[in-house]
Image: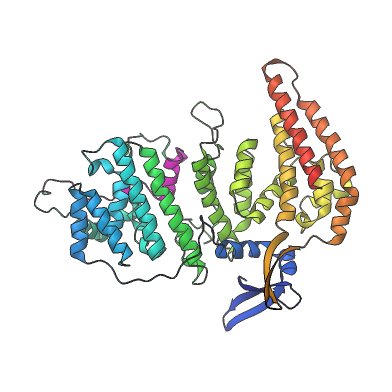
C-alpha cells in the first residue's frame, strides 16, 4: 500500500493517495495525513525517503543516454592507464561522460582497480600523489552514477569472489578486454578484478570497519593486495562509499518498477522458508562500527570513527526501508535482532545510532522493545498489561506509567542506569516524532502566493491534556525512581568516584531535558 502522491484539499488538509496493486488492477485510496499517521506512520516515512531531495539522497534526474563508447576508445583508455598516462585517460573518460556516452563495464572495473590496487599501475608516484589520483577516480565514479544512474553499475556486483570465479565465461571475456598489451603479457598472470579480493559486498564492509567475522577468525590471515600501497583502508572506504551510494540510488530507482529487483535485497539471503529473517551476519558487521563486539583484548570495542558509523547507518537505513516495503525484509526479526545488539552499545554509541538512523518508526520499535524487555517489577500492576499488549506502543499510558517505572535488567554501574534513562528519553521523543510532521502548503490568494507551515499530529487532545495534567507528578515519580537506582549502584569511592559524579550529572541533565519536553 505505497503512497504515490500528496496534495492539499480545499480545507487545507494534507491528503495522501495510496495505491494497492491487485491482480485485476489497482485500488486507490485518499486518506488524510492524520489518519495515515495514526495507523501507518512507516508509510509516510517511506514516502519521504523516496521523494526527499537532499545532498545525501538526491532525487533521480532525467538522463540522456547516447549509447556506449566505441571499443577502440575503450582500448585506448585502458592502454593509457596501463602505461601510467593516467591524466590523459581520466580526461578522455570525463569527455565521454560529458558527451553522455556511457563508459563500459571494463572502464568501471579499471577505475575500481585503480582505487583498490594503485601500486599495480602507479609505480613511479609518491603516496600522496597516489591518494590524490584515487580520489579523482572516486569522483569520476560518482559522476558516472549521476549521469547514467545505478544501472551503469549493474555488472559490477558479479565481480566479487564467489560470483566472479563461478562465471568462467564472464571472467574470460573481462580478461580478454582488460589485457590490452598483448605483445608483452604472455608470462603475466591473467587479469583478476580487484573486487575478487572480497567474498562479497558485506566482506568489503567488514574489512572497511576492521571487523573480523567469526567465519574467518580461525583461518590464517594474509595481507590483501589493496593494503600493499599507501592509505589502504582509506581507499577501501572510497570504494565502499561509491557502492553504498549506488545501492541507495538503485533502491530509490526501483520504487516504481518493483522493489523486489533491487540489488541490495539480493544481498540478503533467504531462510529455509524463502523469507528474509536472518540478519545476524549483516547486523554484526553494521554494529561493529558502533563498538558492539569484543576487541582483541577481550574488552568491548569502542566506536571506530564517524565515517564508519555513517556507512553502517546508511546500510541499516536501507534494511529498515526494505522492512517497510511490502515486508520484503521481515520487520519483527529485524527489530528483534537489532535490539539484541543495541543493548551491547554504550550510551555514546547508542546516541550516535539514534542520530544516524533516519527511520523513526524503526528506532521507536527498537526502543520500545528495549523498555518492554526491561525489569518491570516496579511498574504498577494496572499498567503491566501494556508490556506486550496489542497496540500498547501507541498508548500514552505506556509512555508515562510503564516506561518510566522500568529498570535495566543489568544494573551494575551508573553507566547502566544512564543508558536506561536515555532510552526512556529517546522513546518519549520518538513517540511524538513518528506521529507528527510539518509541511509547507503553498496557496495563491488574490494573486499573491502564500506559504503556510502546517503541523500535523495524531496525538489527540485528550492525550495532550493527560500529559500536561499528569506530567509533573510523573516526572517527580520518575526522579525518585531514578534516584533509588542510582543509590543502589553508586560505588562512592575509589577510582570510579569521578566517573560516578560525571554520570550522575548526565542523568540529572537527561531528566531535566524530558521535563522540558513535557
| Residue 197 magenta-highlighted | yes
Q: Nearer the viewer, residue 437 or 91?
A: 91
Q: Is residue 131 left or right of residue 249?
A: left
Residue 358 seen: yes
Q: Is residue 485 left or right of residue 322?
A: right
Residue 380 seen: no
**Above or below, 443 relative to 472:** below
**Above or below, 265 relative to 404:** below
* Numbered disc total: 0
State the residue at coordinates (76%, 52%).
Answer: 388
Locate residue 380, reporting x and y percent: 88, 44
Locate residue 37, reporting x and y percent: 72, 64
Quarter of the figure with residue 43: bottom right
State the residue at coordinates (83%, 30%).
Answer: 484
Q: Residue furthest left?
A: 183
State the residue at coordinates (60%, 65%).
Answer: 47
Colouring used for the render:
rainbow
Locate residue 372, reporting x and y percent: 74, 47
Q: Residue furthest bottom?
A: 24
Quarter of the figure with residue 144: bottom left
Which residues, given as a range, are shown in magenta? 187-215
| Residue 159 magenta-highlighted | no
Locate residue 142, reporting x and y percent: 39, 56
Quarter of the figure with residue 223: top left
Amino acid at each position: 500500500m505505497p503512497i504515490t502522491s500528496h496534495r492539499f484539499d480545499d480545507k487545507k488538509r494534507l491528503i495522501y493517495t495510496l495505491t494497492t496493486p491487485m491482480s485485476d488492477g489497482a485500488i486507490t485510496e485518499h486518506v488524510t495525513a492524520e489518519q495515515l499517521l495514526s495507523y501507518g506512520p512507516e508509510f509516510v516515512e517511506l514516502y519521504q525517503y523516496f521523494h526527499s531531495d537532499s545532498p545525501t539522497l538526491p532525487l533521480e534526474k532525467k538522463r540522456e543516454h547516447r549509447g556506449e563508447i566505441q571499443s577502440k576508445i575503450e582500448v585506448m583508455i585502458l592502454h593509457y592507464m596501463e602505461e601510467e598516462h593516467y591524466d590523459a585517460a581520466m580526461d578522455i573518460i570525463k569527455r565521454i561522460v560529458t558527451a553522455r556516452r556511457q563508459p563500459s563495464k571494463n572502464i568501471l572495473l579499471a577505475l575500481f582497480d585503480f582505487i583498490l590496487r594503485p601500486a599495480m599501475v602507479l609505480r613511479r608516484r609518491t603516496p600522496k600523489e597516489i591518494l590524490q589520483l584515487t580520489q579523482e577516480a572516486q569522483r569520476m565514479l560518482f559522476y558516472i552514477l549521476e549521469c547514467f544512474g545505478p544501472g551503469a553499475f549493474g555488472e559490477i556486483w558479479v565481480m566479487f569472489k564467489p560470483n566472479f570465479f563461478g562465471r568462467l565465461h564472464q571472467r574470460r571475456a573481462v580478461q580478454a578486454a582488460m589485457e590490452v598489451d598483448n605483445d608483452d603479457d604472455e608470462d603475466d598472470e591473467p587479469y583478476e578484478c580487484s573486487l575478487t579480493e572480497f567474498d562479497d559486498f558485506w566482506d568489503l564492509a567488514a574489512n572497511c570497519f576492521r571487523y573480523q567475522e567469526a567465519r574467518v577468525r580461525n583461518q590464517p590471515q594474509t595481507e590483501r593486495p589493496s593494503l600493499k600501497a599507501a592509505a589502504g583502508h582509506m581507499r577501501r572506504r572510497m570504494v565502499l562509499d561509491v557502492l553504498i551510494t549506488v545501492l541507495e540510488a538503485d533502491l530509490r530507482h526501483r520504487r516504481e518498477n518493483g522493489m523486489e529487483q533491487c540489488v541490495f535485497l539480493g544481498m540478503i539471503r533467504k531462510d529455509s522458508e524463502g523469507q528474509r529473517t536472518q540478519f545476524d551476519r549483516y547486523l554484526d558487521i553494521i554494529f561493529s562500527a558502533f563498538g558492539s563486539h569484543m576487541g582483541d583484548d577481550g574488552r568491548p570495542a569502542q566506536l571506530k570513527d564517524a565515517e564508519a558509523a555513517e556507512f553502517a547507518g546508511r546500510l541499516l537505513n536501507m534494511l529498515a526501508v526494505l522492512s517497510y516495503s511490502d515486508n520484503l525484509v521481515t520487520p519483527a526479526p529485524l527489530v528483534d535482532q537489532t535490539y539484541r545488539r543495541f543493548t551491547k552499545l554504550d550510551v555514546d554509541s547508542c546516541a550516535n545510532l539514534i542520530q544516524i538512523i533516519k527511520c523513526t518508526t524503526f528506532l521507536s520499535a527498537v526502543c520500545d522493545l528495549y523498555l518492554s524487555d526491561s525489569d518491570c517489577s516496579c511498574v504498577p500492576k494496572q499498567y503491566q498489561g501494556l508490556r506486550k499488549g496489542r497496540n500498547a506502543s501507541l498508548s500514552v499510558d505506556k509512555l508515562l506509567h510503564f516506561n518510566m517505572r522500568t529498570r535495566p535488567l543489568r544494573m551494575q554501574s551508573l553507566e547502566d542506569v544512564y543508558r536506561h534513562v536515555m532510552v526512556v528519553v529517546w522513546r518519549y521523543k520518538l513517540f511524538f516524532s513518528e506521529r507528527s510532521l510539518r509541511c509547507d502548503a503553498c496557496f495563491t490568494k488574490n494573486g499573491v502566493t502564500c506559504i503556510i507551515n502546517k503541523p500535523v499530529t495524531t496525538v489527540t487532545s485528550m492525550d495532550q491534556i493527560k500529559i500536561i495534567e499528569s506530567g509533573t507528578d510523573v516526572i517527580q515519580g520518575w526522579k525518585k525512581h531514578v534516584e533509588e537506582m542510582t543509590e543502589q549502584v553508586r560505588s562512592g569511592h575509589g577510582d570510579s568516584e569521578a566517573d560516578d559524579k560525571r554520570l550522575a550529572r548526565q542523568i540529572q541533565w537527561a531528566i531535566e531535558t524530558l521535563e522540558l519536553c513535557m
